[in-house]
Amino acid sequence: MPDRRKHRGPHPEDVRLFAMEIWPILHQAVDDLVWLLSRGYAQKSSLKLVGDRYDLVQRQRTAVGRIACSNADADRRREHQVTAEQLAGRPLSIDGYNALTTIEAALAGGVILPGRDGTYRDMASMHGSYRKVAETRPALELLGRTLAKLQTAECLWYLDSPVSNSGRLKKIIEETAAAAGWAWRVELVQDPDAILSETDRIVATADSVILDRCRRWFNLARETVERHVPNACVVNAN
């Protein structure tokens, strides 16, 4: 069945699954998962154990898994994080889908998850295909306004070439940048994670695989949401 979504918004059950009265339960589940991960237990089995203990449905388990990380991983990520003040005048490599979908989701009222490492993550899932939504261009404009305010140098966006419609998104990003006069380039590559994990440039991402390997990173999605989307549906289960 083709993807006909027009927004990157909430799941129909999210109002109930992530209601404020549920936050303490999710918070305790995150605490337990962090405890297990910090002692070397495997992510998959630990998440099942925690999810079963608190009787969480699959979407809540996914959220808990995206929030939690081991204490060692959180410490490592904070040590390598670049502040907004340190970004001025420096080039930035952007994990395109990772940054964009979080801002799209925030604008559409989707659940935003503050991770234990300080990042903001969304609940969106592309499954190998990206579909432009009503929030795509506004999200790019907010990202651009944030980067312009931070006075970054050239921004190099990486998009996954195996994801269908990446070429169309590349064109939209280039058009948005050209209209605003932003120094952006967009590259379609087979595996952005490998490139972003090894580059000497500062990386904008909330992807845990990249965060655990990259030299320096900037919390672009969170910076943008906090600056421009004050009514975002941030679930404080951290």
Image (spheres, rainbow, N blue to C red):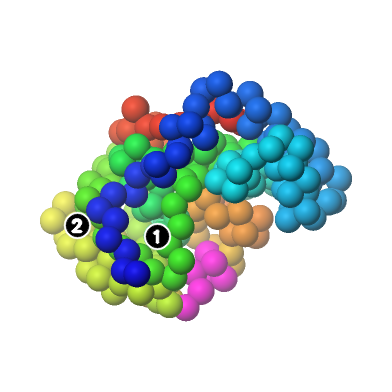
**Residue at mark 2:** 176
Question: Is residue 122 or residue 139 the one in the foreground?
Answer: 122
Quick one: label 2, few (<14), some, or many (20+) residues within 10 Å? some
Asked whether the beta carbons under mark 2 and mark 1 sit within 8 Å of each other, the answer is no
- Please give the range of residues in magenta: 190-196
Q: Is residue 162 above or below residue 56?
A: below
Specify the quadrant of the image occupied by residue 61.
Answer: top right
Residue 218 is situated, as x and y percent measured from the top left of the image, at 49, 47
16 sits to left or right of 170: right
Q: Is residue 140 above or below residue 210?
A: above
Is residue 4 visible to the viewer in this orientation of the structure? yes
Q: Is residue 234 above or below residue 12?
A: above
**Residue at mark 1:** 96
Judge whether residue 193 is colored magenta: yes
106 sits to left or right of 210: left
Specify the quadrant of the image occupied by residue 232.
Answer: top left
